[in-house]
Image: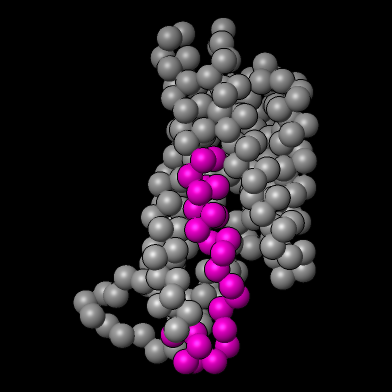
């Protein structure tokens, strides 16, 4: 039994750290205005926000890797309640990992030159388009994963209150997937709730006993 408890507690710690890092990562992105369309303005924009982009890139990398033990811990607890929903929810959450790592590589091309290769403004626009499209995709996947997992969490030892918070988070994740429609304030609320739910869920995992 001890190995199971150890894995779950490690997953809880990882989930807490992941939630914190995801929020800090967003704080670096928050003040950045929408990328300008003209080539000259875009190059100036990249130069002005180089530090923010670099920090957001690094934080996204570590926050994403911390999801791995977190998913394992969640699966250990929830699979006993509903195997099908747990597989689906954890599977969707796992899909986020390679997508985010790809986005880390993409975002890095804005600030980390490879062998001194200079990119044209058109390439930078393509990179930004792929990145923002990827973030949109990740938000939708996270929304689905969160809602499905919360349907199981409400019946588990983790508790109904955590599940309710997760359901609200899942809905906000879906809304936050469309930042061009809802504005910065709503996106900030979505990201804050997402990170807070990770922290709360991580704390609940730390307090969970597996029998």
Task: Tell how many labels.
Answer: 0
Determine whether 151 is above or below 21 in the image: above
Magenta residue span: 19-43
Determine whether 52 is above or below 162 in the image: below
Residue 83 visible (yes or no): yes
Determine whether 155 is above or below 121 in the image: above
Determine whether 115 is above or below 82 in the image: below
Q: Is residue 209 left or right of residue 172?
A: left
The residue at the point 60 percent across, 22 percent down is 204
Q: Within the image, what quadrant is residue 115 found in?
A: bottom left
The residue at the point 61 percent across, 29 percent down is 201
Expressed as whole percent of the image width and height from the top left, the position of residue 101 reads 43, 56
Expressed as whole percent of the image width and height from the top left, the position of residue 143 reads 69, 48
Q: Does the magenta run of residues contain 73?
A: no
User: Taken as a whole, is the magenta stretch helix, strand or loop?
Assistant: helix
Expressed as whole percent of the image width and height from the top left, the position of residue 45 reads 48, 79
Q: Does the magenta run of residues contain 21?
A: yes
Q: Is residue 36 left or right of residue 60?
A: right
Expressed as whole percent of the image width and height from the top left, the position of residue 105 reads 39, 64
* Closer to us: 138 or 48: 48
Q: Residue furthest left?
A: 115
């Amino acid at each position: 039994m001890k190995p199971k408890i150890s894995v779950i507690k490690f997953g809880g710690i990882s989930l807490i750290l992941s939630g914190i890092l995801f929020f800090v990562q967003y704080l670096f992105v928050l003040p950045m205005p929408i990328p300008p369309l003209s080539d000259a303005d875009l190059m100036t924009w990249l130069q002005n926000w180089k530090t923010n982009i670099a920090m957001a890139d690094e934080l996204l990398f570590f926050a994403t890797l911390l999801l791995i033990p977190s998913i394992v811990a969640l699966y250990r607890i929830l699979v006993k309640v509903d195997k099908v929903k747990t597989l689906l929810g954890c599977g969707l959450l796992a899909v986020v990992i390679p997508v985010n790592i790809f986005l880390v590589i993409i975002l890095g091309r804005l600030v980390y030159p490879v062998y001194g290769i200079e990119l044209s403004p058109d390439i930078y626009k393509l990179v930004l388009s792929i990145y923002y499209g990827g973030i949109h995709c990740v938000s939708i996947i996270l929304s689905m994963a969160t809602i499905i997992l919360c349907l199981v969490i409400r019946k588990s030892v983790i508790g109904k209150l955590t599940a309710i918070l997760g359901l609200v988070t899942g809905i906000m994740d879906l809304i936050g997937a469309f930042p061009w429609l809802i504005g910065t304030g709503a996106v900030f609320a979505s990201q804050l709730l997402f990170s807070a739910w990770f922290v709360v869920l991580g704390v609940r995992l730390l307090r969970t006993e597996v029998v």
